[in-house]
Image (cartoon, grey):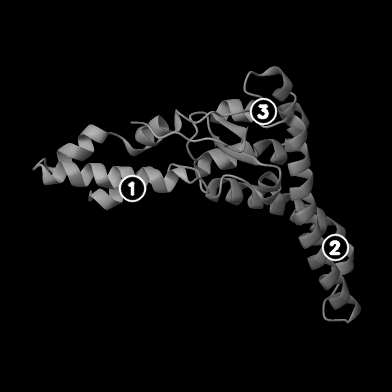
Amino acid sequence: MTGDLYVQSVIDHIPEGLSLRDQIAMELRAHIAERTTLGQPLDQILGQLGDPQRLAASYLASVLLTPAPIFARLVAKVIDAAIVCLISGGIAIMLYLAWRAKFLGDVFFWLPAFCILASILGFVAYTVYAEYRFGRTLGKKLMGIRVVRENGTRISLGQALLRQLPFFGQFFFIDALFVPFTEKRQRAFELITKTRAVAAVLGLVLLA
């Protein structure tokens, strides 16, 4: 592995949107360049730095993770649900108009079921992608919330998927009941996936 690939693998574990990403990249590249100049083999340098995810977590250890307020999380969900419903509703209207224009057959009869199914699947797919790729949905961004692992690093695609299982199983409210009674305000499936929703980070301190 080259030095640049190693640095990028570390950065990939830092949540999107944090200025800390650029600072870490600069510090790591300078550290690797300095050690290389002194004649130390690259493999040895990277071995001393260790696993990229663990190194990223050590940088994030200096960041205070504050549980996101319950009300803010609820509002974020409502915003995200409204966005998905508007999109699926718009598609439904276009299909209805196409049916009225005789472009489609018996679409009117399965249109309600389509709207419900599209809204549920669309909401889950949108949430999974947004939380995995950006660490937050549009609703969470507006409410200053970010989804991370318990150590502050980015969540994996598997974790993003498992977080949404309660929506498929229709037991989201049971899952959410855990939030007021857990130390880090986590849902049941957040405890299982070792993820959490935190408030926007205000202060960052690089490790020496």
Against 153, residue 88 (above or below) is below
Q: Give the residue type that dot 2 points to.
A: Leu
Q: Residue furthest right?
A: 100
With 18 as the anchor, is 85 left or right in this view? right
Q: Earlier in the sequence, mark 2 or mark 3?
A: 2
Image coordinates for residue 92, horizontal then vertical, percent: 82, 65
Residue count near mark 1 (Cα–Cα under 10 Å), binned few <14, some 14–19, many ≥20: few
Q: Give the residue type that dot 1 points to.
A: Met
Image coordinates for residue 166, horizontal then vertical, percent: 69, 35
Q: Residue furthest left?
A: 39
Q: Residue 26 — which label? A: 1
Residue count near mark 2 (Cα–Cα under 10 Å), binned few <14, some 14–19, many ≥20: some
Residue in front for this viewpoint, 174 or 208: 208
Give me the residue at 75% from left, 43% from top: 77
Instruction: Nearest to the eye among marks 2 and 1: give it.
Output: 1
Residue in front for this viewpoint, 121 or 73: 73
Q: Which residue is mark 2?
A: 111
Q: Quadrant of the C terminus?
A: top left
Q: Residue 93 — which label? A: none
Instruction: Nearest to the eye among marks 1 and 3: give it.
Output: 1
Q: Which residue is mark 3?
A: 187
Asked if disc 2 and disc 1 are in contact, CB closer than 8 Å, the reply is no
| SS for dot 2 | helix
